[in-house]
Amino acid sequence: MSLLRRIVIVVATACSLTAPAGFAASAVKTPNFEKVKLANGATLLLMERHDVPLISFTAVIRGGALTDPEDRLGTASLTASLLEKGAGNRDANTFAETVASVGGSITTGASTESISVGGSFLARDQKLMVELLADVLQRPRLEQAQFETLRDRSIEFIRAAKDSDRSELTPIYGAASLFGAHPYGRSVGGSEASLAAIKHADVRQYYTDNFGADRVIIAVAGDFKTAQLKSLLSRAFANWGKAGKPLPTVPKQTEITARRVLLIDAPDAVQSYFWAGDVNVAKSDPRRASLDIVNTLFGGRFTSMLNTELRIRSGLSYGANSRFDRMAEGGSWELGSFTRTEKTIEAIDLALATLDQLHAGALEKAQLESAKSYVLGQYPLGLETASQWAYQLATLEFYGLDRSYIDDYGNQLAAVTLDDAKRVIDEVIPTSRQLVLVVIGKAEVIRDGLRKYGPLTEVKLSDPEFQTGQ
Amino acid sequence: MIRRMLLLGLALVAPVGFAQVPGANEVRATTLANGMQIIVWPDHDIPNVALYNWVHAGSRNEAPGITGLAHFFEHMMFNGTSKRAPGEFDQVLEANGARNNAFTSDDVTVYQDWFPRSALETVFELEADRLQNLAFDPKIVESERDVVYSERRLRVDDSHQGRLQEQVQATAFLAHPYGIPTIGWPSDIQSWTIDDLKRFFSTYYAPNNCTLVLVGDVDPDNVIALARKHFEPIPKQEPPRPVKTVEPEQQGERRVAVNADAQTPLIQFAYHGLAGSDPRRPALDLLTRVLTDGDASRLHRSLVEEQKLAISADSYFTAGFDPGLVWFFLSLPAEGDAKQAEAEFTRQIERIIKEGVTKDELARARSQALADFWRGLATIDGKAQALGSFAVLQGGYQKLFDEPRAYDSVTQQDVQKLAAELLRSTNRTVGVLKSPPDASQTKTGGAQ
């Protein structure tokens, strides 16, 4: 069981910083933190937490895949991976040894909207931590040999992923198909084909254009003294210049008006992995509490409508879930599951029928209260460690939100009525006719059955692209 | 897979270096009259509680015909009792703000609840009910059989790492039930009977075969009082028959090949290793960290960075009631040469046996272990995982707090000696997954 149970949960927490009705008493409040804006635009956020002798940080650079050159998708992601392969006066080996020798960790990654560098060090190593973070962001070496190794390995990782759990690939094909040429549809890690086109100079140019003090947020939480760490960080980042280019604006996303199907042929698959989604609301949407409750009930926890139908009642699947992916200017709402090849159509029919049920007004008061308790009860578990707080602070700042986003959430949940929930189902959750449907599976068995859902485009899992021109 | 989660958990419980863990002296432990062990660690950072019920039954307790049964219980335990309808367990918990999960390994099945402190008694009621009154509705059993099969397809049949690992593990053990895949062989998943289930439940799901761990915003006296109220009335059972089989010493290297339409070939190595209570476990942890923990580790550097024979090199080890396996995983690039990658891996292993590890490498591995120890103890969930695995598998929960010292006392000689003893080629099983020659010819233009 574990995995899917777990996925359901992660999803629930991700879309549900919480705290319901009469239970506001147990909601978590944001501990005090200090915000510093340096003259060059860099933002620092510092929160002391003294429970274990660790310091954690999350640094975020605005941009991410949004700033990838259109014909070189994956450039931001490759740049992120290269940051820690040698920086300042340390080559890649020395850098790795330095981090490991003090038991530190530094991880870098890209997302649709940003590049992030996270890590944690023992409290005694805070000076070294600041030095390494400053080097990674301001003085990465971005050497050619490291670049080539990483690019080639990234291509191999995509191939390896296609030999592994396919449920992790459906959201990539899903976003590509749903958003098309819109930047939210980009595969953040690129594709086998797009990575092969990236040159060393592209990464250097990407760094020059997109890294700078005006793009950075650095959030730190843990076992330190604010005055001391503030002074260390301020000195380390005060002389950093601005990024070479302004941030691009994100175009409006196109609504889905008619259902269509993307089939990805995996001839050796014994299960079909399906995904259905629509374009959806942004992070700042004021109906957040209602949205989180509705998604929790539909596909965000173990007893959700979707998991009840596809797993508990029918045994068709190990699990089924739904989630919002909310970004600055929009995003998506999507559901996903999998079942053995012969049951593909039955399972998809059931998932869509369950969505129809939601629209038909299946929601009751008791369920609403249960979802409020659930979201509230799980809320503190995502706000427990220094590393979680560093991440939360950086996220609030990134989206221009303040602490009330966390502190008032319990009251917002408590205030949600059945009518509010029904309204967002009407306004925000797509109907079963408004979806892009993506299926990875054995095409020769399922192709004909899938045609009834709409015009079908077929590609091969081994094709080196995620974009399908659909 | 499931097994991996457990082990990653164990690996986090590595070494300290700092003498005292805050709050360690507040841990309370007691044994109920029916033999159930209760361990409580108060931690008031957040108003929540993590509960882990460790049932001492895993795939180690299975035999041909009933493989996968321990894991199947992980599913059945959510499916109704004589007092509660199927689904009620999850519905009541979620309505009280709680989330639950479970995992199964070779050694244990562990039931987890994470909940606001206000739900404490409800959780105790529900946990005690399913331990005592589990129902076996034939319709539910059939439906859940399909769910488990779907899990198997996800983790094993449609995953090349999973497919290979199952074959390697089965090959590594001739006699000991650690060779049984925790998810179960397909024909067994399809054919367990209700009687098999009832027998397994009455044998292993007894209070005297459980260790209950709670960490979080609780008062230990209150927890123990609730345990007496809800769990103590459950009658003790005859202790399960011990697993007596000892894996005979391996006589020479074993090999297993898996043909699959693979874009990227895989190699796995599994060496017979240590039991959880073996005092050399910290030395083994440090040895595997020197080889694969981070970009500075030996195998990563040689195989991935310098020679580019692999795209990743990872390891983990199982250390349960009986000696487990020390695993190494290599993923190769699409047209990678499995022979060359294996030769370089073996060369690195022979080097560490012959020359040992350097002082710097040992110090680095220790620091990584120390930091991981603290990261593991940063959450109530991590603490419950750590306390439970020490209590059940590693010779007592108090040993958790001795970990720093245990790691500090490991010497370069200890690591080298252990490498020489365990990482002999005659003690290993090698598995290779790649496309069969005809398939790869169409795909790679005859690169083989």
Image (tube, coloured by chain):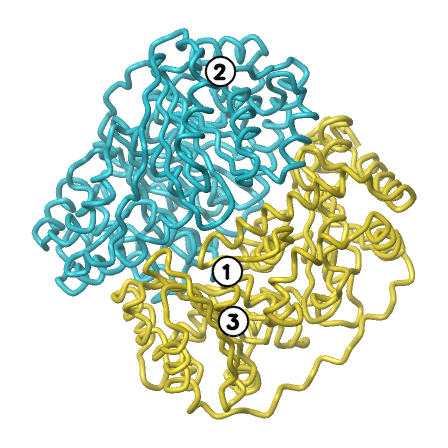
The outermost residue toward the left is A419
Among the two numbered marks 1 and 3 on one chain, the one whose residue lies closer to the N terminus: 3
The residue sitting at 52% across, 80% down in the picture is B37
Q: CA distance from mark 1 to mark 3?
A: 26 Å
Query: Pointer 1: what residue?
Result: B383
Label placed on residue B404: none
Q: Secondary structure at mark 1?
A: helix
Q: Is residue B28 left or right of residue B346?
A: left
| Front-most of residues B336 and A91 | A91
Label placed on residue B72: 3
Q: Write down the colour of chain A.
A: cyan
Does residue A51 appear anywhere in the picture? Answer: yes
Query: Pointer 2: what residue?
Result: A72
Q: CA distance from mark 1 to mark 2?
A: 45 Å
Q: CA distance from mark 2 to mark 3?
A: 47 Å
Height in image: B280 above or below B332? below
Identify which amino acid the numbered label 1 is placed on.
Answer: Lys
The quarter holding residue B330 reads top right
Q: Secondary structure at mark 2?
A: loop
The residue sitting at 70% across, 43% down in the picture is B365
Q: Both on one chain, marks 2 and 3?
A: no
- Looking at the rendered image, the disc whose residue lies closer to the viewer, 1 or 2, is 1
Identify which amino acid the numbered label 3 is placed on.
Answer: Phe
